[in-house]
Image (spheres, rainbow, N blue to C red):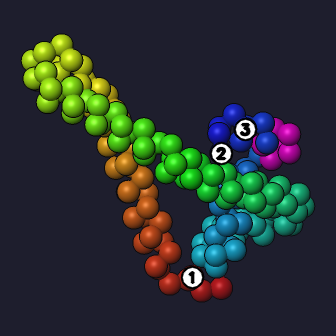
């Protein structure tokens, strides 16, 4: 979810620890809650369940938002990236590497795939971490 929407949601609900609570609620639903998650949820339940309720609402909004963003990336992002790559490689191949269009093609590839590669590295690293967490046996209750 966009950070400005998250900030407005946290402000409107007066939630002080929405992100951590949302994560604890999600891990509890997946039966992967850590001892720290259980302590946080017990503390919040003891002081009032309002924070946990709002974290659950936020989680219910966050999951479809992630699904929509993923669909958008697959439907529009990937084809546009492929088209930029096709045009850039075509410019380099047609006019040569040292031509103005060839240099422009190389710059377009570098500007598109440099940040994209960095982002994909971070996504892969995070996915591996999540995968290790999910494969780990559930903590004792």
Name the image quarter holding residue 29.
Answer: bottom right
Q: 74 or 10, which is in the foreground?
A: 74
- Mark 1 or mark 2: name the one nearer the start of the chain: 2
- For the record, the magenta segment spans 10-15
Contact between labelled residues 3 and 2, with CB atoms less than 8 Å apart = yes
Q: Quadrant of the N terminus?
A: top right
Residue holding disc 3:
5
Distance from label 2 to label 3 (Cα)? 7 Å
Q: Where does residue 124 sit, x and y in percent of width and height?
A: 38, 57
Distance from label 1 to label 3 (Cα)? 33 Å
Could you tell whether 127 is left or right of 121 in the image? Answer: right
Identify the disc placed on residue 1.
2
Contact between labelled residues 2 and 1, with CB atoms less than 8 Å apart = no
Q: Where does residue 119 sit, x and y in percent of width and height?
A: 39, 43
For marks 1 and 2, give the one nearer the viewer.
2
Q: Is residue 13 magenta?
A: yes
- Mark 1 or mark 3: name the one nearer the start of the chain: 3
Q: Residues within 10 Å of mark 3 (few under 14, many from 20)?
A: few
For marks 1 and 3, give the one nearer the viewer.
3
Count of numbered tags: 3
Residue 22 seen: yes
Residue holding disc 1:
139
Q: Residue at x 34, y 49 (%)?
A: 121
Q: Residue at x 57, y 82 (%)?
A: 139
Q: Residues within 10 Å of mark 1 (few under 14, many from 20)?
A: few
Residue 75 vertical position relative to residue 110 in the rendered view, above or below: below
Q: Residue at x 17, y 21 (%)?
A: 102
Q: Quadrant of the C terminus?
A: bottom right
Name the image quarter holding residue 80.
Answer: top left
Residue 140 vertical position relative to residue 71 in the rendered view, above or below: below
Q: 117 or 79, which is in the foreground?
A: 79
């Amino acid at each position: 979810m966009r950070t400005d929407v998250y900030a407005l949601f946290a402000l409107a609900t007066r939630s002080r620890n929405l992100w951590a609570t949302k994560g604890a609620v999600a891990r509890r639903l997946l039966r992967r809650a850590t001892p720290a998650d259980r302590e946080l949820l017990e503390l919040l339940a003891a002081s009032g369940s309002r924070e946990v309720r709002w974290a659950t609402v936020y989680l219910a909004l966050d999951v479809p938002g992630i699904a929509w963003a993923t669909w958008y990336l697959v439907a529009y992002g990937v084809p546009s990236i492929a088209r930029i790559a096709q045009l850039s490689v075509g410019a380099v191949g047609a006019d040569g590497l040292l031509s103005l269009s060839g240099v422009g093609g190389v710059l377009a590839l570098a500007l598109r795939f440099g940040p994209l590669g960095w982002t994909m590295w971070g996504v892969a690293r995070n996915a591996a971490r999540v995968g290790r967490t999910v494969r780990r046996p559930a903590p004792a209750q």
